[in-house]
Image (cartoon, coloured by chain):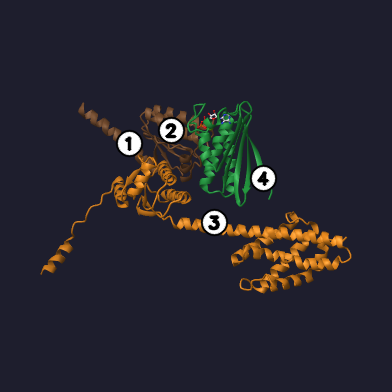
Chain colours: A green, B orange, C brown
């Protein structure tokens, strides 16, 4: 089975809405439970907004992934923005440089099964999340 | 050069009877399925196989789509009938020998072609057999998953105590997965029954660890977000101690020693009072009659 | 510009959020509500989110802001109809919206608003009597 994937741009506020819809429809297709769908879509919303607000725009890749018998949805947010100097700090509840709540990164990490972040100052940030069925 | 699909095509009838004979001797489980059913499945599979092999020798190819679909069906029905995945695979693998025999007869004078074709057809059948096993295991996992869900649901009865008051009496050890299911069903029940108050009773729970306590607190918080109040009842002294030792903060949670206390609190919260009924006139008469 | 309608019901304002709001729409709603509360001297605000499929930290913050601002303007906010999956997710995200009153549905929400405004009227009456 060849796994599908799609890439969506995140360039404006309307794209954050679009990202939520895309994440929802893939989650529905995999028949994730309603709670799992909601968790994935919410995490996608948080990360897309970070890509837009902090990363000055970028993309989201969505794909179905497999691990033995488990299937899941993986979302990868990528930007070529300023990067995050201290990832451990950024992952703390309440840490924000923008007057937000600082829950986007730490919170979305709790909403998914796998969370992977890479960032380089001056080059950009990649955050990948996976929710297994 | 003659390839194996031509040989299969030309000798389909002979291969089929040799295959069926082989299965009846060995791999068949007469206790689980009838000869007729087996023969019919064999005929259909061989037909699909022979047709697909004309255009491809790759088990994963488009040409073998129908064959694979048929094998999935077989895998499913075998699992339902109680076969093991190995027995299911042997159904496909036992086709090797009759095909090899037919190839041997057809390619007598050409040993190198014979080796090639035996290898190609053998490889193809191996892959189809593996596919069948995968399907069989997948079906089995589905069944297990379904049973697990059913068991979880069975062990989490949400009961309606009063119009607007639900109770969730938890019994047995709570692990993280079960707590999550229990909590989700409680929250859905709150919406379905339009209940303002839910009582989680943990009298029947032997121990509570940090993770479970956190799940409880999260559920209570989620219920509040939905507009319902959750009370926690049945906290035994040992659990109270653990909760304090673990540093779990229950200040925002309404707790009561017994389910009945929590229920009384729920009623009063809803503006209801329980009063003892005055002795009725009839009863007084009755006792008088007895005195006489 | 796209706007979420605000309904005036006597002393109260009623908002039903039905669409997946983009961020600007949420900000506009917050501004509109504050303006309307002040304009009508409303006693309460009811926000029904029973058809919202997610609440992320942005919407969560907006709801908390509305509640805080209406409090400053002496109005009570009630949030109604949050779906279980949304509530579970919001808690996991780390938001408990502890400053907001909630109710299961619009009817219950209106009851709470009425109680709140009756209480404060009673207080006012009592003061008036003393003077
Ligand atoms: N893609 C990114 N590029 C650069 N910096 C980022 C990126 N994502 C997050 N950050 C940094 O990490 C901090 C924490 O992010 P987080 O999403 O947790 O909070 P926030 O966006 O500030 O507030 P909230 O999401 O709660 O509204 C941000 O303030 C920002 O400094
Ligand atoms: Mg953020």
Give coordinates of residue B170: x percent, y percent: 39, 53
User: Which image quadrant for residue B292?
Assistant: bottom left
Which residue bears the numbered disc 2? Answer: C64
Q: Which mark is residue A4?
A: 4
Asked if the residue under mark 4 is in contact with the one under mark 1, i.e. CB atoms within 8 Å, the reply is no
Local crowd at mark 2 within 10 Å, few (<14), some, or many (≥20)?
A: some
**Viewer-nearest of discs 3 and 4:** 3
Q: Nearer the viewer, residue C51 or A9?
A: A9
Count of numbered circles on the image: 4
Chain letter of the residue beneath label 3 in the structure image: B
Chain letter of the residue beneath label 1 in the structure image: C
Residues at marks 2 and 3, CA–CA distance in whole angstroms: 40 Å
Q: Which mark is residue A22?
A: none
Q: Is residue B109 left or right of residue B44?
A: right
Local crowd at mark 1 within 10 Å, few (<14), some, or many (≥20)?
A: some
Residues at marks 1 and 4, CA–CA distance in whole angstroms: 54 Å
Q: Tell me, yes or no, whether dots 1 and 4 are on the same chain.
A: no
Residues at marks 3 and 4, CA–CA distance in whole angstroms: 26 Å
Local secondary structure at mark 1:
helix
Which residue bears the numbered disc 1? Answer: C116
Give coordinates of residue B36: x percent, y percent: 67, 73
Q: Residue at x 50, y 28 (%)?
A: A96
Asked if the residue under mark 3 is in contact with the one under mark 2, i.e. CB atoms within 8 Å, the reply is no
Q: Is residue C24 visible?
A: no
**Viewer-nearest of discs 2 and 4:** 4
**Viewer-nearest of discs 1 and 4:** 4
Q: Tell me, yes or no, whether dots 2 and 3 are on the same chain.
A: no
Which residue bears the numbered disc 3? Answer: B145
């Amino acid at each position: 089975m060849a796994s599908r994937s799609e890439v969506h741009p995140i360039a404006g506020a309307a794209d954050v809405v679009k990202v939520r819809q895309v994440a929802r429809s893939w989650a529905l297709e995999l028949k994730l439970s309603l709670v799992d769908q909601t968790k994935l879509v919410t995490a996608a919303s948080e990360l897309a907004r970070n890509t837009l607000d902090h990363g000055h725009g970028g993309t989201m890749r969505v794909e179905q992934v497999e691990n033995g018998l488990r299937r899941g949805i993986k979302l990868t947010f990528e930007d070529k923005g300023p990067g995050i100097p201290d990832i451990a700090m950024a992952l703390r509840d309440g840490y924000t440089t923008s007057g937000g709540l600082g829950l986007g990164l730490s919170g979305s990490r709790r909403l998914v099964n796998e969370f992977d972040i890479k960032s380089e100052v001056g080059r950009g940030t990649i955050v990948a999340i996976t929710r297994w069925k | 050069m003659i390839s194996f699909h031509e040989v299969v095509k030309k000798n389909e009838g002979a291969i089929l009877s040799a295959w069926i004979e082989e299965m009846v001797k060995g791999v068949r489980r007469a206790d689980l399925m009838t000869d007729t059913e087996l023969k019919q499945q064999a005929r259909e599979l061989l037909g699909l196989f022979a047709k697909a092999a004309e255009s491809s020798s790759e088990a994963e190819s488009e040409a073998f789509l129908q064959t694979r679909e048929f094998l999935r069906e077989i895998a499913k029905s075998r699992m339902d009938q109680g076969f093991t995945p190995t027995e299911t695979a042997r159904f496909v693998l036992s086709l090797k020998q009759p095909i090899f025999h037919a190839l041997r007869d057809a390619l007598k004078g050409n040993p190198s072609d014979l080796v090639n074709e035996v290898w190609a057809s053998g490889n193809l059948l191996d892959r189809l057999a593996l596919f069948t096993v995968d399907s069989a295991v997948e079906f089995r996992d589905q069944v297990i998953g379904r049973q697990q869900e059913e068991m979880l649901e069975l062990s989490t009865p949400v009961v309606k105590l009063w119009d607007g008051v639900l109770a969730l009496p938890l019994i047995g050890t709570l692990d993280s997965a079960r707590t999550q299911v229990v909590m989700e069903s409680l929250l859905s029940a709150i919406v379905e029954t339009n209940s303002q108050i839910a009582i989680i009773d943990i009298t029947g729970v032997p121990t509570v660890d940090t993770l479970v306590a956190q799940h409880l607190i999260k559920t209570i918080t989620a219920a509040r977000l939905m507009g319902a109040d959750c009370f926690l009842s049945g906290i035994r002294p040992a659990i109270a101690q653990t909760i304090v030792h673990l540093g779990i903060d229950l200040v925002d949670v309404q707790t009561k020693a017994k389910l009945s206390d929590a229920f009384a609190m729920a009623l009063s919260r809803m503006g209801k009072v329980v009063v003892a009924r005055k002795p009725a006139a009839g009863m007084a008469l009755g006792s008088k009659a007895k005195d006489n | 510009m796209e706007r979420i309608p605000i309904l005036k019901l006597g002393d109260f304002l009623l908002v039903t959020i039905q669409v997946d709001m983009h961020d600007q729409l949420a900000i506009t709603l917050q501004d509109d509500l504050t303006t309307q509360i002040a304009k009508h001297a409303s006693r309460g605000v009811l926000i029904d989110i029973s058809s919202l499929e997610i609440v992320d930290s942005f919407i969560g913050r907006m709801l908390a802001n509305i509640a805080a601002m209406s409090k400053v303007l002496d109005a009570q906010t009630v949030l109604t109809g949050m779906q279980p999956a949304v509530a579970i997710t919001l808690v996991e995200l780390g938001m408990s919206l502890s400053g907001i009153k909630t109710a299961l549905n619009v009817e219950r929400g209106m009851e709470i608003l009425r109680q709140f405004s009756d209480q404060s009227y009673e207080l006012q009456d009592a003061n008036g009597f003393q003077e």
